[in-house]
Amino acid sequence: MPSHQVNKLNDGNYNIFIKKKDFFYFTNSDDATKNKFMTGNIVAKQLSHDNQHLVLHKNQYISKLDQIIKDFEYLSLKGVSTGQQFSDLKKQFEKQVHETEKELSVLDEKISRLNKIISAIDGLSSDDLRKVETSEAILSDLKIDKSTKRGDLNKTIEEVKFERQVLNEQFHDIVEKYKTYQGVKENVRDRENDTIKNKEVKR
C-alpha cells in the first residue's frame, strides 16, 4: 500500500484512503501464479473484512457541491455577481442540490432494504413455521442467500447509515454556506443601488 494513502493514528491504528477505481498489484512470494491486480473497491472490502472495521465512503455529491461553492467564492473575489457565468453556476448548484436530495432518498431505501433483510434472516431461526416460510419468501424476492451472515449485514447497514449521516450533515452545511453567500451578495447589490440612487439625487 503506497505510503501517501496510509495515515498512522496516535493510538497505533491506521486510516487508509482508497479510491474505488484505484488498481493495486499484490504479489505472493511463495507462488507467483497467485499474483494479481485488485481494484480499490475490492481491497477496501477485504481490509474491512479482515480487520472488522467499517468502510467509510466519501459521497461524490459532497465534492461536487463543495466545488461549486468554491467557484462562487472565486467569482466573488473577481467581483462577478451577475451575468451568464454566474447564472449558469447558480443553475448548476440547484441541480446538484436536487441530485443530492435524491441520493439521500436512495440511501434511505438501502437502509430500509437492509433492515428488511436482517429481519428476514432472523426469522429463519423462528420456531414458527409460517414465519420461517415468510422469511424465506422475502429473501427469495430480494435475491439474498439464506446463508448470508447477520454480522456482515450489520456492518453494511452501519456503513450506509454513517455515509447518509455525513452526506446529510455536509449537505446542509454547504446549503447554508450558499445561503450566506447569497445574502452577502444581495446586501452588496443593495448598497450599490443605494449609492447610484444617491448620486442621481445629488444631480
Image: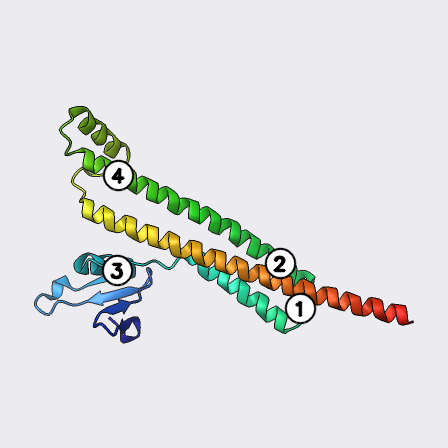
Cα–Cα gap, marks 4 and 3: 23 Å
Q: Which residue is mark 2?
A: 88
**What residue lies at 22% left-to-right and 72% top-to-bottom?**
11
Q: Quadrant of residue 201?
A: bottom right
Residue 74 drawn at (x, y percent): 58, 71
Labels 1 & 4 near each other (Cβ < 8 A): no
**Residue type highlighted by circle 1:** Val
Instruction: Please identify, in this view, whether the residue under mark 4 or under mark 2 is nearer the observer.
Output: 4
Q: Which residue is mark 3?
A: 44
Circle 3 Cα neighbour tier, 10 Å, few/some/many (<14 / 14–19 / ≥20): some
Report helix, strand or loop for mark 3: helix
Q: Which mark is residue 117?
A: 4
Cα–Cα gap, marks 1 and 4: 52 Å
Q: Earlier in the sequence, mark 1 or mark 3?
A: 3
Q: Residue furthest left?
A: 30
Q: Earlier in the sequence, mark 4 or mark 2?
A: 2
Residue 170's place in the image compared with 139, above or below, is below
**What residue lies at 50% left-to-right and 64% top-to-bottom?**
67
Labels 4 & 3 near each other (Cβ < 8 A): no
Quadrant location of the C terminus?
A: bottom right
